[in-house]
Amino acid sequence: MQPVVHVAPEADRAIEEAITAAGGRIGPLDEADALVWLDWDSNTFDVDLPERVRWVQLPSAGVEAWLARTSDGRTWTSAAGAYGLPVAEHALALMLAGARRLADCARARTWTDPPARPLDGSTVAIVGAGGIGRALMRLLAPLDVEVLAVTRRGRDGTLPADRLPEVLPAADHVVIAAPATPDTRHIIGAAELEAMRDDAWLVNVARGSLVDTDALVAALAAGTIGGAALDVTDPEPLPDGHPLWSEPRALITPHIANPAATLRRYLARHVGENVARFARGEELLAVIDAQAGY
């Protein structure tokens, strides 16, 4: 079957080339079997989908804002896994920055001797072993790093979420890479921060809601943990004057782990693979489970 795929709200050359290379044909919505939607803002989705559209591909990995729309009997897929490598690269950069105390050095105005340490030989806890977590494990493989991966159910060599309290005290770095759902909200709160080592770094490249910001601010101020490197925050954008901006143990990047310059390239690969699977009648990548929340 050659599926007809409509791309909206605007055409995109890279996405359309991926669709045709995978065996699909670009067509109008009223003839389409599938829709690839490229606007990340769920509020702009005002499309009256024809009954013949059986699959909708979204551009984002996080779909919490889309869940109410995905229970219409169609197959909806996210971009989960598509951006795993660039986000994992950023997580690795934040881990290295924390271990080598690069933020301290960048802020210094005189020659200093920060307590830097190598990433080599450390223990890294990765909370969420989806596309980002697995990509980060591959990047860490050349280093002598012990990885403790935590997932909801603890499958495929990972530990279940109820063992997180055991994992936290063992880790030099705790990387948050899980989806944002009601179950993962504030998965890192005051108790979890207290359980971490006083020299451990928290790295969040998932969603700000997974970390209790007030508890984090208090833990950093008290020196309960070594530091926090955050690409995402709650609230976001982080307001001017927020305590995290002036906290010397915090390193903030403005949600740039998935660079706009390469976003469409990675999404195009994901779309192409899903179009090929759709044409063959196979299970699609990153099918959204509205009940699970991702």
Image: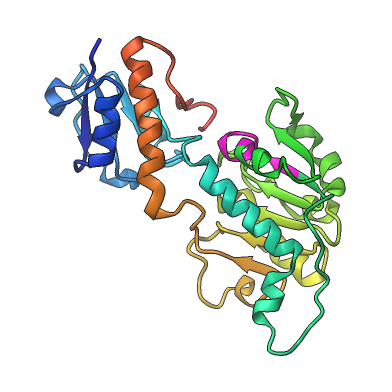
Query: Which residue: 54% across, 28% down?
Result: 292
Q: Is residue 74 magenta?
A: no
Answer left or right for 170 relative to 188. Answer: right
Query: Picture coordinates of residue 9 (x, y %)?
Result: 21, 41
Q: Residue furthest front?
A: 142
- The picture quadrant where one finds residue 59 is top left
Answer left or right for 182 relative to 72. Answer: right
Q: Is residue 126 magenta?
A: yes
Query: Which residue: 50% across, 71% down?
Result: 239
Query: Which residue: 78% across, 83% down?
Result: 112
- The picture quadrant where one finds residue 74 is top left
The boundaries of the magenta stretch are 125-134
Residue 82 vertical placement versus 116 (above, below)? above
Regarding residue 71, the answer to whether it shows in the image is no
- The picture quadrant where one finds residue 114 is bottom right
Image quarter in which the N terminus is found? top left
Along the viewing direction, whichever of 32 and 11 lies nearer the viewer: 11
Regarding residue 242, the answer to whether it shows in the image is yes
Query: Picture coordinates of residue 6 (x, y %)?
Result: 20, 29
Along the viewing direction, whichever of 195 and 231 lies nearer the viewer: 231
Query: Picture coordinates of residue 260 (x, y %)?
Result: 39, 54
Q: Tell how many labels.
A: 0
Residue 53 vertical placement versus 262 (above, below)? above
